[in-house]
Amino acid sequence: MCRMLAYGVVATLGVALLGISGCATTAPTRFYLLTPMLDTATVKPFAPARHLAIGVGPVAMPPYLNRPQIVTRATSAMLDFAEFDQWAAPLQDSVTRVVAENLSLLIPTDRVALHPWPRATSVDYQVSIAVDRFDGAAGGEVILLGHWSLWDADGNELVMKKVRFSAPTGGSEYEALVSAMSRTLADLSQDIAATVQGVAPRASTR
């Protein structure tokens, strides 16, 4: 009887220790957001464009990025999905938001709509973006690869450009990776803004 009781106590203690051990090793999940650019000192404002209404989206993302986990490259052919480092919002929505905020500063205009905008909202130009790759290696660099198109109010494609932007992470932390991703979106936004600024004067003289 005493032996059976001793076995029961040992088993109970074992289960309790496993539970404590499991709780002690569970890391909290960290959440990240892409951020818009803050420094526009190197960008020449395009005053005549203040009246322009710009629509941003849709933004198409490859399936491997449509997930909460932040994706990094282990090798050129292997991906890692972070279990405890995740996006605070869907990546597709964040890219749309950041590009829109960047364009509102770069063009500049306060008339920026996010796709899908209400039917009653009219835009002078629409920017659609197709992302083929948007990831990087910890301690390496981030690569943004894809193409974007500029459409007029009648649905005519005015410009289509393939793009590849990269930025060093400057560190092995996920925060450094996310900051580098934001910088590549700033490069993309400047490319789009320069094109809009070039097209808008020609369009206004028609």
Image (cartoon, rainbow, N blue to C red):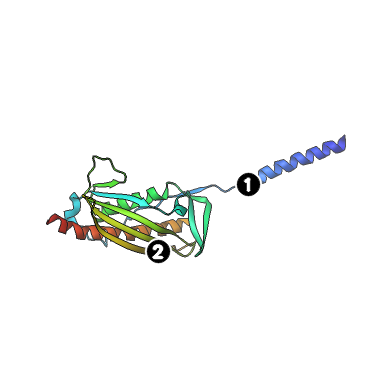
Q: Position of residue 101 (x, y in %)?
A: 30, 51
Looking at the image, can residue 173 be seen? no
Q: Residue at x 42, y 58 (%)?
A: 134
Residue that badge 1 annotates: 24
Which residue is pictured at 87% across the width and 36% down the height? 2
- Percent position (x, y) of residue 170? 45, 64
The residue at the point 28 percent across, 58 percent down is 192
User: How many badges with numbers are in the image?
Assistant: 2
Q: Residue at x 34, y 59 (%)?
A: 147
Local packing at callout 1 (Cα closer than 10 Å; few below 14, some 14-19, many 20+) is few
Which quarter shows the N terminus? Answer: top right
Q: Nearer the viewer, residue 120 or 49?
A: 120
| Image spot of residue 150 (x, y percent) | 26, 56
Identify which amino acid the numbered label 2 is placed on.
Ala
Name the N-terminal-most of marks 1 and 2: 1
Query: Which is in the foreground here, disc 1 or disc 2?
Result: 2
Q: Who is closer to the viewer here, 61 or 180?
A: 61
Left or right of 26 in this view: 134: left
In this image, 188 relative to 125: left or right? Answer: right
Q: Residue furthest top?
A: 1
Q: Is label 1 in contact with label 2 (beta carbons under 8 Å)?
A: no
| Three-letter code for the amino acid on which mark 1 is drawn | Ala
In space, the residues marked 1 and 2 are separated at their CA atoms by 36 Å
To which residue does mark 2 refer?
Answer: 167
Q: Residues within 10 Å of mark 2 (few under 14, many from 20)?
A: some
What secondary structure is found at the residue carrying circle 2? Answer: strand
Specify the quadrant that holds the C terminus. Answer: bottom left
- Nearest to the observer: residue 139 or residue 56: 56
Q: Position of residue 155 (x, y in %)?
A: 24, 51
SS type, badge 1: helix
